Image (tube, helix red, strand yellow):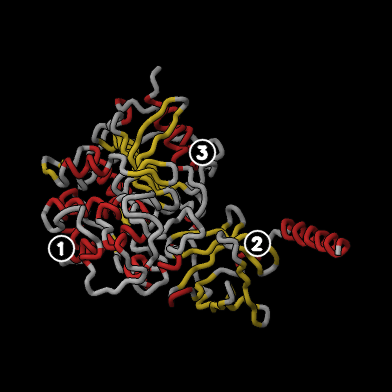
């Protein structure tokens, strides 16, 4: 038995060593490029990066690394094996989790801008600041000189984004004293291109909840959730579930067994995404706490909230946003397909906006709901939203807003954040009268967004 154990370890060592040594060339990786079938009758693209000689799966606009293990064998970011299949030596599809997907089209072109923060950048690259251009979008611009921000630090930040030290940053914008003073885009992104918000969408749902309550369309945040769904029959129904309130959804304190930080939680987000009805799926979950108890991050909570807004306003959630919040703060160009069912499994019912328009929400909240003299959201709702309601994953939490602090060279700064996977951040810095917006593509991996703010933006306000 001991001898067999030693032999097994020996073989594992050989295999592991071989796997770690396997390195495909860029030309070899290009063999896999194309458009492939994917789950729920959707498609994905496979692309080879000339910058880091890595294969990526591209789902919508999100890029996910595939780590080369052996010839035709890769590992995705969930540590699942992805094996490419061949017919007569030519790649014909791939197999993952015992499912096989066919290659649909080999003719696909990936622009170089996808892989390089700035194309054709010289080795001695030096950033030259340019004041953001005034556009007819309701955002005023100004020069950086009188903002109190540190140009030297921002120059250093730009160099590190461009050379890839700070990877996959798509945009950095700074609004100081009500005016956009810094605006830079990278890779294939620009000021008009819409960017996915991922979970930063939740803070927009919070804002729309407040507006619906302000207008009397939702009577109170204390209304019970189940009263909005008389047509459903839910599993695991008990008295605790019956008293879950709208406020409990806003604070992620529904008590349902749904917690992204707990791998044993029954409310798995991927399972929800692939279910035919996300409302049914989430509200069918068993209760593991009382409503208003432990804060547990659960994407099903704001999804239910979105449907409640639709029922209360008698219109689709994006249309209500268009007629109220977006109209008032000048957001005209957006994409929001709010369909909480299988069709949204890879788009997550998320909102797509330009970074400038993302900044408008931060500016609205910084100004206590006031925009060009109009009270778009009541001051009380803004105050409650940005006040600690619970603690989740060790961080204070309001109404679908994170109440975070960042330390910059020993000085603590308290911020309020809408944030999403990949590095999407809308930060409100009340004491500095500032909003910072960052977008990125570090999906399911460490984002440098907070590091950028800590090292290159906030230190300018440290007391000398």
Q: Report if the CB atoms under discs 1 and 2 are less than 8 Å apart.
A: no
Residue 368 picture quarter = top left
Whether residue 184 can be seen here:
no
Residue extending farthest to the front is 239
- Secondary structure beneath dot 1 equals helix
Q: CA distance from mark 1 to mark 3?
A: 47 Å
* Residue that badge 3 annotates: 160
**Badges 1 and 3: C-beta atoms under 8 Å apart?**
no
Q: Which residue is mark 2?
A: 68
**Residue 313: assigned label:** 1
Q: Is residue 130 above or below residue 34?
A: above
Q: Residue, x 44% and y 31% (percent of image)? A: 407
Q: Residue at x 59, y 78 (%)?
A: 92
Q: Residues within 10 Å of mark 2 (few under 14, many from 20)?
A: many
Q: Position of residue 387 (x, y in %)?
A: 28, 39
Tell me which residue sits at (33%, 56%) in the image: 254
CA neighbours of label 3 inside 10 A, class few (<14), some (14 to 19), many (20+) = some
Of tags 1 and 2, the one toward the viewer is 1
Whole-percent x, y for residue 173 in the image: 35, 41
Mark 1 or mark 3: whose residue is earlier in sequence: 3
Label 2 residue SS: strand
When the figure is inspected, residue 30 is found, relative to residue 184, above or below; the finding is below
Q: Nearer the viewer, residue 448 or 202?
A: 202
**Distance between the Cα atoms at labels 2 and 3?**
27 Å
Select label 2 or label 3 by which is in front.
2
């Amino acid at each position: 038995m001991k001898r067999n154990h030693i032999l097994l370890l020996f073989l594992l060592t050989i295999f592991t060593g071989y796997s770690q040594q396997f390195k495909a060339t860029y030309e070899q990786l290009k063999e896999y490029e194309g458009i492939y079938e994917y789950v729920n009758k959707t498609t994905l693209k496979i692309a080879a990066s000339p910058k880091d000689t890595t294969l990526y799966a591209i789902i919508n606009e999100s890029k996910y690394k595939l780590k080369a293990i052996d010839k035709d064998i890769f590992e995705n970011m969930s540590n699942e094996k992805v094996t490419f299949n061949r017919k007569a030596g030519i790649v014909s599809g791939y197999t993952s989790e015992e499912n096989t997907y066919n290659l649909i089209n080999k003719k696909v072109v990936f622009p170089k801008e996808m892989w390089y923060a700035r194309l054709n950048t010289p080795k001695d690259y030096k950033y030259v600041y340019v004041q953001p251009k005034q556009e007819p979008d309701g955002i005023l611009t100004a020069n950086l000189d009188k903002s109190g921000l540190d140009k030297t630090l921002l120059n250093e930040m730009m160099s590190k984004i461009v050379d890839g030290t700070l990877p996959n940053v798509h945009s950095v914008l700074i609004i100081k004293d009500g005016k956009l003073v810094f605006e830079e885009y990278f890779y294939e992104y620009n000021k008009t291109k819409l960017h996915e918000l991922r979970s930063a969408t939740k803070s927009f749902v919070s804002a729309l909840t407040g507006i619906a309550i302000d207008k009397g369309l939702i009577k109170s945040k204390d209304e019970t959730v189940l009263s909005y769904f008389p047509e459903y029959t839910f599993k695991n129904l008990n008295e605790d579930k019956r008293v879950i309130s709208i406020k409990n959804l806003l604070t992620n304190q529904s008590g349902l067994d749904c917690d992204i930080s707990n791998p044993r939680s029954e409310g798995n987000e991927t399972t929800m995404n692939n279910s035919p009805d996300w409302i049914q799926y989430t509200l069918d979950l068993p209760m593991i706490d009382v409503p208003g108890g432990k804060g547990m991050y659960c994407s099903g909570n704001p999804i239910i909230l979105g449907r409640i807004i639709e029922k209360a306003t008698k219109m689709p959630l994006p249309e209500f946003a268009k007629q109220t919040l977006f109209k008032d703060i000048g957001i005209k160009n957006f994409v929001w397909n709010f369909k909480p069912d299988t069709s949204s499994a890879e788009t997550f019912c998320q909102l797509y906006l330009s970074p400038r328009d993302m900044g408008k929400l931060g500016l609205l909240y910084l100004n206590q709901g006031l925009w060009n003299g109009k009270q778009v959201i009541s001051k009380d709702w803004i105050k409650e939203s940005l006040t600690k309601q619970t603690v989740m994953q060790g961080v204070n939490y309001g109404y679908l807003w994170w109440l975070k602090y960042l330390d910059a060279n020993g000085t603590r700064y308290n911020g309020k954040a809408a944030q999403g996977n990949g590095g999407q951040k809308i930060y409100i810095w009340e004491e500095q009268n500032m909003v910072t917006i960052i977008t990125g593509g570090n999906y399911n991996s460490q984002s440098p967004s907070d590091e950028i703010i800590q090292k290159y933006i906030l230190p300018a306000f440290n007391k000398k």
